Amino acid sequence: MKRLEKVKVGYRVAIVVGLLLLVTAPLFVSNWIVFVVTLGCAKGMVVLGVVLLLRGGLISLGHGLYYAAGAYAAAFALNRWNIREIYLLIPLSLLAGGGMAALTGLLLRRYRGIFFAMLSLAFSMILYTVLFKFYDVTGGTDGMRIHLAKEGVPLFFYYLTLVLAMGVIFLGRRIIASPLGYMMQAVRYNEIRVEYMGASVGMVIYFTYVISGMLGGLGGGLVALNVGHVAPELAYWTACADFVFVAILGGANHVLAPFLGSIVFEFVKNYAFKFSPNTWQMTLGGILLLIIFFLPQGLWSLTETIERKVIQWQLSSKQ
């Protein structure tokens, strides 16, 4: 048992070392890498929201809706209402995503399977059309620029995103280990039994969906403030599909998995565009398919495999 405890301690130490590397990364890597990691952490929050629903057997193809809502909320607050305080912009983005999820969730909680997926996608495409058509309000296809021209802004947003990501990871662990998290997982396997236990399946899905939408809005707001621009493509079906793909790429067995998958996805996408600008989509798809082929349970399963191998080695050496 002492050897197994040492393995668990080593596992925790590895996570702490990883966090320390992220904290000190700006000291020894380029600003471009810092920017990509920032985007990966911000989008990882959106992916975590998708994973919360996946644990209940629900595939959301419409998280671009909440992602775009959070991004445009920050853009409108800055450009239309001249709100420049970050401590106000971030909550506004979170509330925008959560508010949209609270509205759409009233209908979506009644559906399952492909109907849930396609209806959620339809809502996102409705927002895309609105953002695309209402040029005078949203900027149309040109989108809206976000001006935060201050010294040290990229580094500030890196650490802000990192702190918020740590907070989201902590809350995600608590949600998964809460009665709501357990009931959401039970819904995946047997809704009737959940109802017999006295819980409302519809409300379990609804509350999880609202939390998921809040994470989407938070991630969208952070991405908008980092990039400095928003466009209707944030709500397009390709953006929605990316979040689901990254959820599969990272895995759904740990709250850190969406962030790992998102960071890897951003790096692969950027390097693919850098080295093959004309065929980067094909390069990106090929690399990611290879990863999924060799790690069907997601990137996080690699850490679990290493942990299992170490435990087996410890037990065999003891004998």
Image: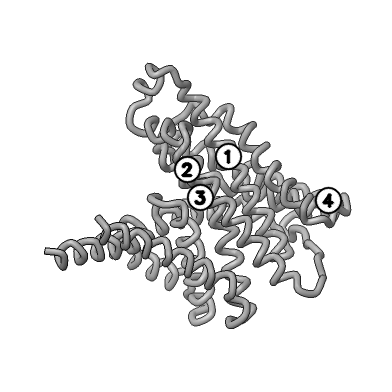
In the rendered structure, which amino acid carries the disc numbered 2? Leu
In the rendered structure, which amino acid carries the disc numbered 3? Leu
Whether residue 195 appears in this view of the structure is yes
Q: Is 180 left, or right, of 9 in this rendering?
A: right
Which of pointers 2 and 1 lies earlier in the amino acid sequence?
Answer: 2
Q: Where does label 4 land, which residue?
A: 136
Indicate the quadrant containing the C terminus: top left, top right, bottom left or bottom right: bottom left
Which of pointers 1 and 3 lies earlier in the amino acid sequence?
Answer: 3
Query: Colour scheme used in the picture?
Result: one colour
Instruction: For label 4, count other residues whose C-alpha is less than 10 Å away and answer few (under 14), some (14-19) or many (20+).
Output: few
Q: Where does label 2 land, which residue?
A: 52
In the rendered structure, which amino acid carries the disc numbered 4? Asp
- The answer for how far apart the CA atoms under marks 1 and 3 are is 10 Å
Q: Going 39% across and 70% down the picture, which residue do you hit? A: 287
Circle nearer the viewer, 4 or 3: 3
In the rendered structure, which amino acid carries the disc numbered 1? Ile
Q: Which structural element holds mark 1?
A: helix
Could you tell me if the residues under marks 2 and 4 are in contact, i.e. CB atoms within 8 Å? no
Q: Where does label 3 land, which residue?
A: 48
Q: Is 41 left, or right, of 72 in this rendering?
A: left
Circle nearer the viewer, 1 or 4: 1
Q: Going 61% across and 62% down the picture, which residue do you hit? A: 162
Q: Which structural element holds mark 4?
A: helix
Q: Going 64% across and 78% down the picture, which residue do you hit? A: 31
